[in-house]
Image: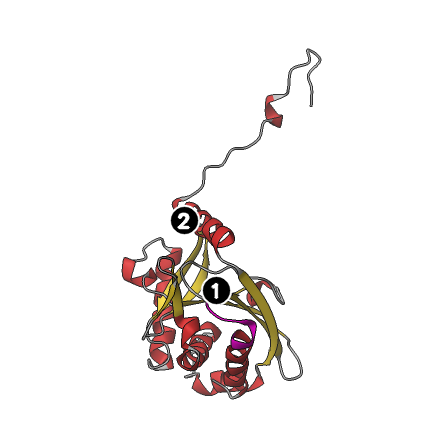
């Protein structure tokens, strides 16, 4: 709006909002990913009925079953054991892939300060009850702004789940120097409870067929109930 004198109304000035520390870290990493990683995303539906049934079986009244993200971390870690390049990280000079012997799965957590990723260590060998407890504790610390370095360090692969916000599929971005990230979409409320998985991978490290075989094993793990 312009005043009668021709000057801009002060209420029309843009609201300049400084980035939080977490937002600055995310911005730096995502810019690096966009500029340096030749990323490709593939999608595939998965039937969740058996996984959700197992979740109910693991529930201890009057509690609840383990978090879906914890169960998915187990499925993904086991698939990574068969497709170890996707559990690697890119080395620039000389070009190589550093394959990590342990499978530490980062779970993206939405907080009031921005997105953070907490790490479930040795997700393929740790009991699901322990992983679920660890995830719950770390999510609580994340939202209270009390994460430790150990909570967020050494991830070899990331899972990011937007299904709870109604998103059916999306294109997640890799956290450098990881090789891949799995996006999890909303699960249908009927039928065999299908949901879409979106795998973004670094094409320098694996080809599309390799990524597709890994994603097929993840789907098979979900279909078998984890």
Q: Would you say residue 205 sits in the magenta stretch?
A: yes
Q: Cβ–Cβ below 8 Å for labels 1 and 2?
A: no
Assess disc 1: are there few (<14), some (14-19) or many (≥20) residues with their C-alpha within 10 Å of its C-alpha: some
Q: Earlier in the sequence, mark 1 or mark 2?
A: 2
Camera-side mark, 1 or 2: 1
- How is the model colour-coded? secondary structure
Residue 25, numbered label: 2
Q: CA distance from mark 1 to mark 2?
A: 24 Å
User: Considering only vertical position in the picture, is 198 above or below 32?
Assistant: below
* Coordinates of residue 219 in the picture (x, y in percent): 54, 81
Residue at figure coordinates x 53%, y 85% from the top left: 220
Per the image, label 1 sits on a secondary structure element best described as loop
217 lies left or right of 21: right
5 lies left or right of 187: right
Q: Quadrant of the N terminus?
A: top right
* Coordinates of residue 63 in the picture (x, y in percent): 42, 78
Q: Which residue lies most toward the top here? A: 5
Residue at figure coordinates x 44%, y 61% from the top left: 109
Residue 20 in view of the camera: yes
Q: Which residue lies most toward the right here? A: 4
Residue 139 in view of the camera: no
Per the image, label 2 sits on a secondary structure element best described as helix
Q: Nearer the viewer, residue 35 or 191?
A: 35
Residue at figure coordinates x 63%, y 67% from the top left: 168
Name the residue that disc number 1 marks. 204
> How many numbered dots are placed on residues in this image?
2
Q: Nearer the viewer, residue 81 or 127?
A: 81
Q: What segment is highlighted magenta in the picture?
A: 204-210
Q: Nearer the viewer, residue 8 or 78?
A: 78
Q: Would you say residue 167 sits in the magenta stretch?
A: no
């Amino acid at each position: 709006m312009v005043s009668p004198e021709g000057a801009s109304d002060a209420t029309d000035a843009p609201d300049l909002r400084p980035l939080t520390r977490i937002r600055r870290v995310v911005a730096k990493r995502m810019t690096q990913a966009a500029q340096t990683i030749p990323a490709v995303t593939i999608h595939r539906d998965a039937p969740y009925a058996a996984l959700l049934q197992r979740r109910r079986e693991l529930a201890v009244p009057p509690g609840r079953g383990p978090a879906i993200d914890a169960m998915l971390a187990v499925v993904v870690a086991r698939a990574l054991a068969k497709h170890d390049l996707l559990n690697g990280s890119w080395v620039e000079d000389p070009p190589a892939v550093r394959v990590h012997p342990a499978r530490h799965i980062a779970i993206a957590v939405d907080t009031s300060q921005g997105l953070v990723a907490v790490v479930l260590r040795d997700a393929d060998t740790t009991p699901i009850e322990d992983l679920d407890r660890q995830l719950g504790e770390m999510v609580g610390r994340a939202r209270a702004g009390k994460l430790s370095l150990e909570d967020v360090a050494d991830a070899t692969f990331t899972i990011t789940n937007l299904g709870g916000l109604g998103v059916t599929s999306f294109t997640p971005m890799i956290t450098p120097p990881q090789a891949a990230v799995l996006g999890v979409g909303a699960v249908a409320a009927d039928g065999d409870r299908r949901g879409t998985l979106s795998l973004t991978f670094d094409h320098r490290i694996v080809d599309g067929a390799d990524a597709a075989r890994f994603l097929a094993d993840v789907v098979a793990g979900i279909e078998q109930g984890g």
